[in-house]
Image (tube, coloured by chain):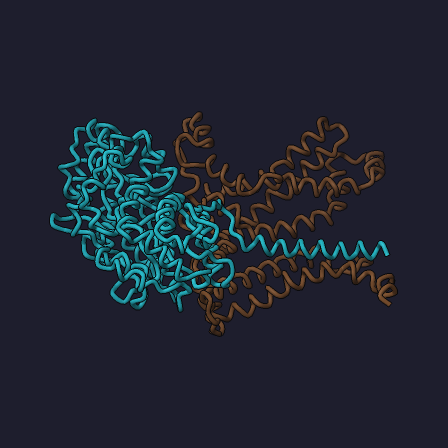
């Protein structure tokens, strides 16, 4: 008799063990915290995944406002922060299997096309975007759309600008304000290298920020109108040739980490080994968070152009926030998302908390918001970013995101750029190879 | 009736192997069959998969990156075999020696790296082999006037880092296998051999090596598999699955890139099947050569 009890116990414990395994695999790893934002007992708990911790802070602020304004539709937000790759991989599996996906999630632009393949498993957001449509930059919505259906809500414009370390430039006797064209930049860079032994900028091997900027100046793109890759195109050859020439003259050099937005590169910049970063405006938050030694030394300016009169900026990067089809309360999630990211309040908070250039460009004109002396970003930089932004406002171009984009990105950032900047491979040859590889992969 | 069934001597063995059989069927045979089927399909997020015949395999044959991944995995496997079988065997013999002092200390310090997580170890090796002047290896090389090397950006130097990690991590484990093999060799053989005047080297080649053969075959088999299936080490060393010029990309890394990162599960399944075939062919040949399939009396 006793033995039978033991067997039953054993079977039970094995069953619970197996069941336990199944359960933990559906909850994601990473750091989870529940924000209640003053919500009452009846609040609906929504889950939100992101790969940027700061985004959670923004949602925390907006959640409080939402719960005060909507006492009958209160929300508790369960925020999970995971590393970039992890989060996107987990999300794609969860969406694919229909099990374990969060209600709301951030998807980075580079990964977004993967989630739009076939019939997107994301909720259409057109109706909640409509009330705000006239106030926000259209192209940023288009990035996260397919066949006229909007699936993601943008966070920022991501206008590309130049970040100059004025301490290094002054030491070399260079005034960044006089740099207009790439030729000016080259001459300044040669002077900086001769006088200080430091590099003027970076030759990026693991990101395409600089290439996008140079393509946009020429009115070109990585893909043609139909969305097919055009990697060995004339403008891209020209862009890489220009950068390679800068590298050969010791104006720019490769950097540890491969591009300015990596931990290794923060260290290099912070140590003052490189004077310039050409990055989307959100790089500001990297300066304030990871390069504290440079406070009061960084000036923001438009990016040099190949020829005067060319557009001086391009929108770079971006995060589309989505609602999944398996969300607990789709209507509530949609309304909250629009409130938290598209309302004027939200756009002001996006600047205040995150230091991003908000998609509602009216905010760019609000002096009391953009020039608020208590704002950490206003304090950190020499000049006010919005002075530059408003100057280049009508010149911010767009690089399309198509279903070929993730593949293009992976080939350029792992193979091609390394071949060109590290091994000195012939540019046309490297780009032809890349084109062939991308076509093969997209077959 | 139930009691009789429960105490039946005939049933008992089956009951005991049942958990293994179930795990084997559910977590091995079923996924294997379903990924075999999947390798003939185009699988997209949350939608019905479409049958596309051998398209995935055709594409695989012309895929330069896949070839690169296979080459990387093969080189890595061969080099780990070259390093991780002779040296652990040698260390095991040394530690097993009667005159060895601080035996337990060496045993545990060799084994210690296996207890650390690959994630932690990979991250630390990445920092050690960093390209900046201040990284550990570069500052050490700097003492001899060597310019900083971009270890993780070159094929050869990248592999040096990868193999350093593998050696550091697995030497102790393989050594323990060999040690347990050595314990099974009776001392009398060595005594008899020394009386007959055999030198230590003769004793090693004529007694130790042949009698260690079963252990060696076992270590060889799992090392071949582990070498070809290596993934996390590379992922951690390069902080992601995308190493420059794919120098650290392995077959499993490519499977992960296609299946998980690019949502092309059908194509990834084809990669997996090819990996399985390669591993099986190499290991079965190896086992056949070493006589594992011969009946006991013939061996």
Tell whether B109 sits left or right of A162: right
Pinpoint residue A196: horizontal percent, then vertical percent: 24, 28
Q: Is residue A33 above or below residue B112?
A: below
Tell whether B198 sits left or right of A422: right
Judging depth in this view, the residue of B196 and B31 nearest the camera is: B31
Q: Is residue A196 above or below residue A38?
A: above
Q: Which chain is brown?
A: B
**Residue at 80% over, 42% down:** B185
Q: Colour of chain A?
A: cyan
**Residue at 43% over, 42% down:** B152
Pinpoint residue B23: horizontal percent, then vertical percent: 68, 60
In the rendered image, the quadrant that contains the C terminus of chain A is bottom left
Pinpoint residue B283: horizontal percent, then vertical percent: 64, 57
Judging depth in this view, the residue of A169 and B211 nearest the camera is: A169
**Residue at 59% over, 42% down:** B83
**Residue at 35% over, 58% down:** A335
Q: Is residue B176 above or below residue A229?
A: above
Tell whether A113 sits left or right of B39: left
């Amino acid at each position: 008799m006793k033995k039978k009890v033991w067997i039953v116990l054993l079977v039970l414990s094995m069953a619970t063990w197996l069941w336990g395994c199944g359960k933990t695999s559906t909850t994601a790893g990473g750091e989870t915290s529940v924000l209640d934002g003053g919500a009452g007992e009846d609040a609906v708990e929504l889950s939100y995944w992101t790969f940027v911790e700061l985004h959670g802070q923004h949602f925390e602020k907006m959640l409080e406002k939402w719960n005060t304004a909507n006492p009958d539709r209160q929300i508790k937000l369960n925020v999970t922060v995971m590393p970039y790759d992890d989060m996107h991989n987990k999300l794609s599996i969860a969406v694919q299997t229909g099990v374990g996906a969060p209600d709301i999630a951030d998807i980075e632009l580079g990964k977004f096309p993967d989630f739009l393949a076939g019939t997107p498993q994301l909720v259409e957001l057109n109706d909640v975007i409509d009330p705000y449509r006239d106030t926000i930059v259209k192209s940023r919505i288009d990035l996260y759309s397919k066949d006229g259906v909007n699936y993601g809500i943008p966070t920022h414009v991501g206008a590309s600008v130049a970040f100059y370390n004025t301490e290094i430039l002054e030491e070399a006797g260079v005034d960044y304000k006089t740099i207009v064209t790439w030729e000016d930049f080259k001459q300044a860079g040669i002077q900086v290298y001769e006088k200080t032994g430091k590099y003027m900028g970076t030759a990026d091997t693991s990101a395409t920020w600089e290439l996008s900027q140079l393509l946009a100046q020429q009115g070109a793109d990585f893909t043609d109108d139909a969305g097919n890759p055009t990697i060995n195109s004339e403008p891209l050859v020209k862009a890489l040739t220009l950068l390679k020439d800068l590298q050969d003259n010791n104006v720019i050099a490769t950097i540890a980490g491969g591009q300015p937005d990596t931990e290794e590169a923060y260290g290099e910049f912070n140590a003052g080994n490189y004077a310039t970063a050409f990055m989307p405006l959100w790089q500001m938050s990297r300066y304030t968070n990871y390069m504290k030694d440079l406070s009061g030394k960084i000036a923001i300016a438009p990016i040099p152009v190949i020829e005067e009169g060319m557009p001086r900026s391009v929108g770079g990067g971006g995060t589309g926030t989505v609602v999944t089809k398996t969300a607990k309360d789709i209507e509530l999630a949609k309304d909250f998302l629009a409130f938290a990211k598209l309302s004027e309040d939200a756009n002001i908070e996006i600047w205040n908390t995150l230091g991003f250039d908000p998609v509602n460009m009216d905010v760019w004109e609000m002096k009391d918001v953009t020039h608020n002396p208590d704002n950490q970003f206003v304090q950190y930089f020499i000049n006010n970013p919005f002075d530059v932004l408003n100057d280049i406002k009508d010149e911010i171009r767009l690089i399309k995101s198509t279903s070929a984009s993730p593949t293009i990105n992976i080939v350029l950032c792992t193979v091609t750029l390394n071949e060109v900047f590290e091994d000195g491979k012939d540019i046309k040859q490297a780009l032809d190879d890349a084109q062939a590889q991308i076509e093969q992969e997209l077959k | 009736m139930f009691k009789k069934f429960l105490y039946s001597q005939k049933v008992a063995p089956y009951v005991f192997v049942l958990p293994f059989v179930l795990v084997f069927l559910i977590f091995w045979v079923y996924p294997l069959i379903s990924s075999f089927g999947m390798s003939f399909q185009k699988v997209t997020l949350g939608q019905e998969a479409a049958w596309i015949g051998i398209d995935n395999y055709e594409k695989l044959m012309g895929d330069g990156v896949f070839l690169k991944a296979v080459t990387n995995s093969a080189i890595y496997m061969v080099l780990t075999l070259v390093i991780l079988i002779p040296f652990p065997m040698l260390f095991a013999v040394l530690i097993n020696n009667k005159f060895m002092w601080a035996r337990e200390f060496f045993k545990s310090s060799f084994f210690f790296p296996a207890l650390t997580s690959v994630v932690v170890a990979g991250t630390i090796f990445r920092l050690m082999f960093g390209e900046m002047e201040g990284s550990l290896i570069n500052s050490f090389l700097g003492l001899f006037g060597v310019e900083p090397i971009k270890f993780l950006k070159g094929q050869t130097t990248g592999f040096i880092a990868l193999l350093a990690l593998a050696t550091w991590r697995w030497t102790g484990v393989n050594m323990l296998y060999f040690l347990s093999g050595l314990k099974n060799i009776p001392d009398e053989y060595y005594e008899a051999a020394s009386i007959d005047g055999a030198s230590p080297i003769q004793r090693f080649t004529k007694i130790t090596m042949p009698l260690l053969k079963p252990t060696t075959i076992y270590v060889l088999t799992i090392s071949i598999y582990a070498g070809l299936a290596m993934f996390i080490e590379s992922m951690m060393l390069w902080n992601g699955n995308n190493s420059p010029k794919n120098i650290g990309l392995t077959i499993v890394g490519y499977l992960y890139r296609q299946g998980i990162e690019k949502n092309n599960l059908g194509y990834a399944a084809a990669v997996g099947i090819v990996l399985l075939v390669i591993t099986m062919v190499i290991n079965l040949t190896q086992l056949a050569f070493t006589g594992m399939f011969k009946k006991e009396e013939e061996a």
